[in-house]
Amino acid sequence: MAQAAGLFMVDEIMLVAIDEDINDSDIVALQDRLSEEVYANDAQGIVIDISALEIVDTFVGRIIAQLAGIGILLDAPTYLVGMRPAVAMTLVELGMTLPSVKTARNLQHAVTRLRAAR
């Protein structure tokens, strides 16, 4: 079984790439891995890339909110990148505006903002 999310540490920033075929068990594993890796590596920020997602539902919205919550609790500012317009519209239609989640247009914008905040 291929992993539905990857974690990568780059310049004190934890990158999380979420694939389109992520499921419940993958999410539980990702949450555990993310919290452990952010803590162990003293990550100064988290960037969650959802560019592989073409469609979303409330499950994916909850995933995003939970991953961002981990960042908040571990003092690692979190950005969501790679959101397609259709995904944004669907999340709004579902009533999931994710007010605690910061967004950036792409990975470079998020990294620039995280570095500026140091």
Image (tube, rainbow, N blue to C red):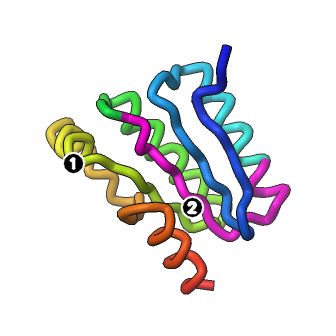
The percent coordinates of residue 80 (x first, y second) are 44, 56
Q: CA distance from mark 2 to mark 1?
A: 25 Å
The percent coordinates of residue 44 (x first, y second) are 68, 70
Do the numbered discs 2 and 1 sit on residues whose CB atoms are within 8 Å? no
**67 with respect to 6 (left or right):** left
Q: Nearer the viewer, mark 2 or mark 1?
A: 1
**68 with respect to 8 (left or right):** left
Reading the image, the residue beneath label 1 is 85
Please give the name of the residue rendered at 40% of the width and 33% of the height, measured from the top-left corner. Answer: 60
Range drawn in magenta: 37-53
> Quadrant where the C terminus lies?
bottom right
Q: Which mark is residue 35?
A: none
Reading the image, the residue beneath label 2 is 72
> Quadrant where the N terminus lies?
top right
Crowding around mark 2 (Cα neighbors within 10 Å: few <14, some 14 to 19, many 20+) is some
Using the image, determine if residue 29 lies above or below residue 70: above
Label 2 sits on a secondary structure element that is helix
Please give the name of the residue rendered at 51% of the width and 43% of the height, measured from the top-left corner. Answer: 66
Q: Quadrant location of residue 99?
A: bottom left
Number of marks in the image?
2
Tell me the amino acid under the disc marked 2. Answer: Ile
Q: Residue furthest right?
A: 40
Tell me the amino acid under the disc marked 1. Answer: Pro
Crowding around mark 1 (Cα neighbors within 10 Å: few <14, some 14 to 19, many 20+) is few
Magenta stretch contains residue 19: no
The percent coordinates of residue 41 (x first, y second) are 82, 60
The percent coordinates of residue 97 (x first, y second) are 26, 51
Q: Earlier in the sequence, mark 2 or mark 1?
A: 2
Please give the name of the residue rendered at 60% of the width and 47% of the height, measured from the top-left corner. Answer: 16
